[in-house]
Image: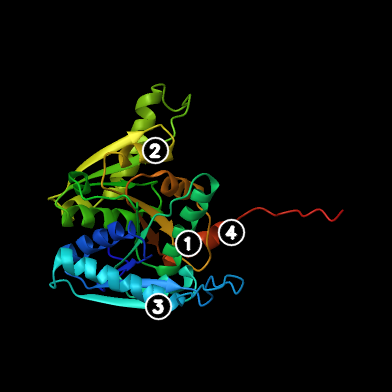
Amino acid sequence: MATWARTGPVVVEVDGSAEGFHVVDYACLEAVRSGAELVLVAHYQARSSYNPMMPGYQPQPPGELADAALRAAVAHIRHHYGYTLQVTAVSEEGARLKVLPQAARHARLLIVGRTRTRGPQRLVAAQGNIYLTARTGCPVIVVPLNWRPSLADRKVAVGIDGTPLSLEAVEFAFRTAADREGDLTVVHAQHAPRHDDADGDVESSWVRRGDLTVSETLAGWADEYPEVKVTRFLTAKPVVEALVREGAQAGLVVLGARAGLLPVGDPVARRAVAAMACPVAIVPHHVTAKERAQRSRIVETGGDVVVPTY
């Protein structure tokens, strides 16, 4: 069932801030659990903030600032985790959405910090992380800058929608719950119609449909991970509201996202990533040949499109 390489290093973005050490700590724990190498990445732009109108101001080159941030992060890791963890530090010139995918092209996991933004800018930042997932091709975990280890880290929640988009997310959620020796909550928001002509019992009808969707999505995974306790959460509430509710009690919420070169907008994933207070794993779904064929048949059988010329 695996669709991406679960080998390679854990890659983490280093931004040079004191709060960024919390993100590094999160990455260290992930690397320790998996026995993987930890790669620290700091990107920088060649142009500095130097202003010739400011006499006496001696700017430090951006590359040196990035190297200094990496040295501080390595010192932090050695102080708290010793020398048993294999660590590599890399600074690279370029934009964030270019450097990080390049550094994580063979990674099992990419970990980044959540930007402190509000309002529309928070949605923009969330879309940037979803785009980063599509460019990278491996799961990306977005960690709040105020994260601290807690017992909630053993609780994992995954959102499913009954489509292939959830396949890799479910796999990642089960494996993560098993690695953390924790529990898994499966969240599915099922639309509850006001009336159902096929069944007079409206409530039992939509519950059955939702439960069937969950069962089909989880088929085989419970047998592969019998040690993981699974709780099904079926709700008629909006999906983002349901995910945020579970995220308040979980250490990680897992979501599926489309993988590809184009930043396909997913408003549900974008709003969920922006609204979550806990770490969020965005897992890319790689479209199979069968899915492409099905999409092609749907397009071919579609009706004619009339374009007015006046």
In the image, residue 160 above or below residue 204: below
Q: Which residue is labeled 2 in the image?
A: 189
Alpha carbons under labels 3 and 4: distance apart: 53 Å
Q: Nearer the viewer, residue 245 or 200?
A: 245
Q: Earlier in the sequence, mark 2 or mark 1?
A: 1
Alpha carbons under labels 2 and 1: distance apart: 24 Å
Look at discs 3 and 2 and give the one toward the viewer. 3
Query: Of helix, strand and loop, which one carries label 2?
Result: strand
Q: Earlier in the sequence, mark 1 or mark 3?
A: 3
Note whether residue 105 is visible. no
Disc 3 marks a residue whose amino acid type is Glu
Q: Which residue is labeled 3 in the image?
A: 64
Are there few (<14), some (14-19), or many (20+) residues within 10 Å of tag 3? few
Residue at 60%, 56% (x, y): give it.
301
Q: Which residue is labeled 4 in the image?
A: 299
In the image, residue 99 above or below residue 170: below
In the image, residue 238 above or below residue 16: above
Q: Is residue 301 left or right of residue 4?
A: right
Look at discs 3 and 4 and give the one toward the viewer. 3
Disc 4 marks a residue whose amino acid type is Val
Q: Is residue 254 left or right of residue 261?
A: left
Q: Nearer the viewer, residue 52 or 62?
A: 52
Query: Of helix, strand and loop, which one carries label 3?
Result: helix
Alpha carbons under labels 3 and 2: distance apart: 49 Å
Locate residue 111, reporting x and y percent: 33, 62
Q: Which residue is labeled 1 in the image?
A: 131
